[in-house]
Amino acid sequence: MRVFVAGASGAIGTRLVPQLIERGHEVIGTFNSSPEKGDLLRSLGAEAIPLDLLDAAAVRKAVLDAKPEAIVQEATALAGGGFSRKLDRTFSQTNPLRTAGTDALLAAGRQAGVRRIVAQSFAPYRYAREGGMVKTEEDPLDPATPKGTEKTFAAMDYLDKVVTDAGGIVLRYGGFYGSANDQLVRPVRKRLFPVIGNGEGFMSFVHLQDAASATVLALEHGEAGIYNIVDDEPAPLRDWLPVLASALGAKPPRHMPTWLARIVAGTDGVRMATQTRGASNAKAKRELGWTLRYPTWRQGFIATYAPARADPVQQRR
Ligand SMILES: NC(=O)c1ccc[n+]([C@@H]2O[C@H](COP(=O)([O-])OP(=O)(O)OC[C@H]3O[C@@H](n4cnc5c(N)ncnc54)[C@H](OP(=O)(O)O)[C@@H]3O)[C@@H](O)[C@H]2O)c1
């Protein structure tokens, strides 16, 4: 298949491109920030084109010129920025990519006669905080979005809806890890990420290589709809955080009572640490035939971070 990957130069895109090429697909990958990203994509075997997804005319031209059979939307703008207490601040550049950027890709795809669309979404923190701790794609999303996160969750909801309405596939990925500079590495090494309260809030992770392999399968034979792309072991904060700290060679995480965490991490931080639900990958395994190289973060954290521990440059970060 000729596959147009928007946001091919990012964390997931750079794992996805080689897997697509390995499977015999042709890849047209987009980058946004610098010509070096184009060189990187070419070195991975893709045709590389610069593209700002917020320029709808440029998106239309790029897609029509590329004549793809499928489009994959993996664009976010999270590199370089630290995480703010307010998610809407952290995601301020990403949200328009998920709304206007996705609209532009869908419109261009329609015009170019593209029938297969796969788009990046997110599973953690989104399912309703009631009932069981592990949720399927059928379960309701949380209707009560905390202040300062409304735009971020609305952008994900928007993407989920327009892509499925268009007959496409939405991949609600777990929290990505699999690279020495993953977002959690620095705060956990510096013991800035505590277990809050009872640490009962669930998280679902996925290794970047596994996220990429699920994306290839979805593209090749997924049915329209939503898939949680997460590993086999959704787990409470109090379980996974000490394992991550140990894999990084960091001291064990601190513990913080909820009243103090509300001041330091805000209401969202407390909610994420104590109430959020994990996601089930049963549908993706059943319908896509997905098998994971790292079925749980227990193996994946060690495989990812133990080699980096031996590297004194990584240790100083
Ligand atoms: N599910 C998750 O947990 C999740 C999801 C996404 C990201 N993350 C994490 O966030 C961190 C940063 O992610 P990342 O490395 O993928 O970088 P990123 O800055 O989020 O970029 C992702 C992709 O989107 C492209 N992009 C950015 N702005 C664009 C625009 N206006 N138009 C078109 N494309 C645009 C980037 O191009 P350039 O490379 O040229 O900038 C890149 O190809 C990583 O640690 C990653 O694991 C986690």
Image (cartoon, rainbow, N blue to C red):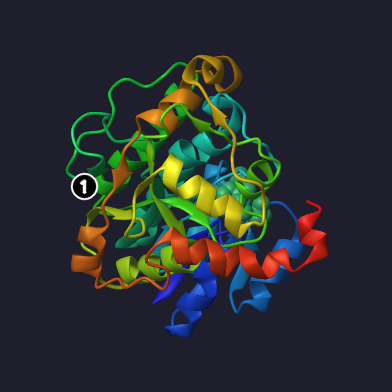
Nearest to the observer: residue 203 or residue 64: 203
Neighbours of disc 1 within 10 Å: few (<14), some (14-19), many (20+): some
| Residue depicted at x 22% and y 57% | 224
Whether label 1 lies within 8 Å of ligand 1 gets the answer no
- Quadrant of the rendered structure where residue 238 is? top left
| Residue identified by numbered label 1 | 136
| Residue depicted at x 41% and y 30% | 198
Asked if one can make out residue 213 in the rendered structure from this viewpoint, the answer is yes
Nearest to the observer: residue 180 or residue 222: 180
Give the percent coordinates (x, y) of residue 192: 65, 35
Give SS at disc 1. Answer: loop
In screen coordinates, is 254 left or right of 5? right
Q: Amino acid at mark 1?
A: Thr
| Viewport quadrant of the N terminus | bottom left
Asked if one can make out residue 51 in the rendered structure from this viewpoint, the answer is no
| Residue depicted at x 59% and y 32% | 90
- Quadrant of the rendered structure where residue 278 is? top left
Give the percent coordinates (x, y) of residue 61: 53, 56
Give the percent coordinates (x, y) of residue 49: 63, 63
| Residue depicted at x 68% and y 77% | 43
Q: So how many labels did they put on this image?
A: 1
Give the percent coordinates (x, y) of residue 283: 20, 59
- Quadrant of the rendered structure where residue 305 is? bottom right
